[in-house]
Each structure stands twice: as structure tokens, then as C-alpha cells.
Image: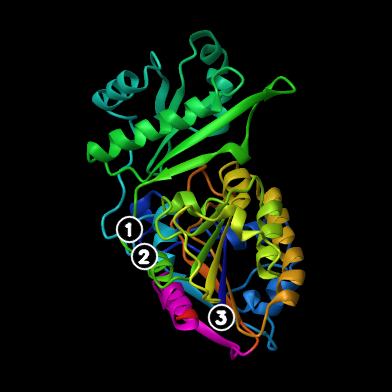
Amino acid sequence: MSRAIVMVIDSCGIGAMPDCREFNDIPECNTLRNVCAFNHGLNVPNLTKLGLGNIQDFEGIAKNSDAIGQYGTMKEKSKGKDTTTGHWELAGLISEKPFATFPDGFPDELIEKFIEETGCGGILANCPASGTAIIEQLNEEHHKTKFPIVYTSADSVFQIALDTDLIPLATLYNWCETARKILDEGGYNVSRVIARPYKIIDGKPTRISKDRRDYSMVPSRTLLNDIKDRGMKVVAIGKIEDIFSKSGITHAIHTGSNKEGLELTLKAIKNELTLESIAYPDYKDSGSENYLIFTNLVDTDMLYGHRNNAKGYGEAIEEIDRYLTDILGQLKEDDLLIITADHGCDPTVPGTDHTREYVPLLVYGKHIEPKDLGLIDGFDYVAKLIKDWIF
């Protein structure tokens, strides 16, 4: 049995790429290094053991001449700095054309079509905004009109927020599916439609992470399709299923927090996850014991990067490290563990958007030779690692 376990620490970039200014970023952005500096170091003994501190100078993460893993820096080939582009490239798909962004809001004809086809009556906002700020700003008007809050960001996203105590969650999902269809049919090249449900908790509009859903464009063929077509399992934990629009996935389970995602990943490694309950209806068990566990850990990005919370970001990294004690201890002889990221979202620089950054790569297996991988051209290096390991 050969298994590959990929853990994506969402937005954990490690330095601005040379073309960062083309993406409205500054050379000073370095998510992990700046988070470490803000927190005067992080307590991450397992990541240190794997060799994270050998990649570059991170305050409080020591260099380790006896690192047990392979470690390096990956440079993105695709034109983007978003979740979809990053994950697709990790799975072998290079995006030559960047997804469309809407710094002035969505065009009138798109919004009119959305209102007509959903029957929502109207929309609020239609501008780039911070999700937490826009729901606080427009919550009262949302309750008066029952119009959804539609907004975007510096990324290619069509986001729909509403209070699910006012409008049912199922309606929000239906409206998102409608938006996805309109965008695809109109050729708008928008990466994701995101359902952003919230409730009023202690008098404050609060987003409900576990009910968030992403509706991505369907990628052309990736490594995940190759794995599935060979009769192997692709177990998606967190928002992986949404990022790939279900393409190439055989089993999927959403999560409401990093803690839940880490616990489910550990269960999957220990063969304690009830796969039958999360299998797709079209999945047919071929008997192959080779498979991929693919986990996205989103809290670093969603809760801390976008909210400029460097302290919380550091605590989230430390939480991941604590779980690595058990994860590393439960790996089998033929398991390959890959830890990486998909882009940056530096909480210490101006703005609340993703940042165009290099990402770290840590690779560990009981029979893998520890070494410095240096600078790697392309996140698709991960796809090659997985393919060589499980095929």
C-alpha cells in the first residue's frame, strides 16, 4: 500500500516572487517570516525536525543539520495568487491565463442576469470588500430588503453573503449555483463563486465557516483524474472538493476548522475514517490500496491572513505542528507526507488580499533521503512526486 498525504497550509507563503508588483503586492511580503517576526518566533518542533528552518531564516525556527525530511522552495508557474490556481498547479495543471478580477465591481449585465435568474429582487454592495466588514456594514439593509450581499476582492471571486436565519442556507447554495452557471455561460473566467453564510451571534454578524461552499470552475484534467481513473481513491478533506469542482475526487468531507481537518487527516492515516460514508455515488472500489489524502487547512488564510491577524496566524501554525506529532507517528512504511502552501496572505503588510509568494515544500517518508531541494520551478513538482509514489 502506497499512500500520499498532502497537507496544504492555506496562504503560508515564504517571500514575494519577482513579479509580485504585477499582482499589486510589495517585495516585503513574506507571510511566514513576517508572522514569525511578529510573534517573536513560533513553537514548531515538528516542522523544525522536517527542515522548515533550513529553507530560509525564520525567527524562532532553528536550522537543523539533522532534518529528517526534504525541504525546498517552490515558485509558481501559473499566472495567479489564488487558492484555485495554486491547488490546480499542485495537482499538475498550469494556468497560463489569469482569472478575471473586478476592481470596480461586476458589470451591470451580469448583476441584472443574476437578479433575474435567482429572483432575489436585488443585490447589495457589488464592490471589492473585506467579507467581515461588508456584512457588518450592510447587515441592517440586508434585513430590511432581504437582498443578498454580493462582493468581490482582489482575487477572482463572486461572493454571496446572507444571514441564514433570514434566508435559508439552501437558497444561498442555489443562488451560488446559478451564479456559477451564468459566469461560465458568459465566459467571465471567474475562478470561484463563494457562499458566505452568516448569523447574528451576540449581536454581531458572524460568518459560519462550516457552511461555506466554493463553486470553482471545472479544471481540465489533473493528476486527481489520473488517480481516480486507475481505480484509486482521492480522499478530499476541507475545501479540496470545491476547489476541484468534484473533478477527480472519489471521497470528500468538509470541515469547519483546521482542528477538524487535522483530526480527520489523522483518522484517514490511521484508517479510522469511515470512507463508505463519504464516497461519491459513482465510486467503484477496485481493490487498490494506493491512494491520495488531500487536505486543505484554511484557517491561516480565512481567519487570520485576510483579517491581518498575525498572532492568530502564528497560533494556527503551532496548532498544525502539534498535530504533526501524531501524524508523523502514525505514518506507515509506504506513506509519503507532503506539506506545502498555495499562495501567500501576509497579515503584516497593507491590504487584506492574497500575496504573490513562493511557498515552502516539506517531504517526508520513512525511506526518503533527507536533502535540500533548493528552488523548484513549479508547484506541479508535487504532482510528479505523488505520481512517482503511488503509480
Mark 2 Cα-neighbour bin, 10 Å: few <14, some 14–19, many ≥20 = some
- Identify residue type, mark 2: Thr
Q: Residue at x 32, y 63 (%)?
A: 221
- Identify residue type, mark 1: Lys
Asked which colour scheme the image uses, the reply is: rainbow
x and y percent of residue 27 in the render? Answer: 45, 59
Q: Which disc number belongs to residue 222?
A: 2
Q: Is residue 287 left or right of residue 381?
A: right
Residue 152 versus residue 59 in the image, above or below: above
Residue 249 versus residue 184 in the image, above or below: below
x and y percent of residue 312 in the render? Answer: 70, 49
Residue 290 versus residue 311 in the image, above or below: below
Closer to us: mark 3 or mark 2?
A: 3
The residue labelled by disc 1 is 79
The N terminus: image quadrant: bottom right
Q: Is residue 102 left or right of residue 257?
A: left
Q: Which disc number belongs to residue 2?
A: 3
C-alpha gap between disc 2 and disc 1: 17 Å
- Identify residue type, mark 3: Ser
Question: Of 137 and 387, which appears nearest the observer?
Answer: 387
Question: Of 41 and 328, which appears nearest the observer?
Answer: 328
Q: Which residues are magenta?
A: 367-389
Mark 1 Cα-neighbour bin, 10 Å: few <14, some 14–19, many ≥20 = some
Closer to us: mark 2 or mark 1?
A: 2
Q: Are marks 1 and 3 in contact (CB under 8 Å)?
A: no
Decide which of tag 1 and tag 3 comes sooner along the chain: 3
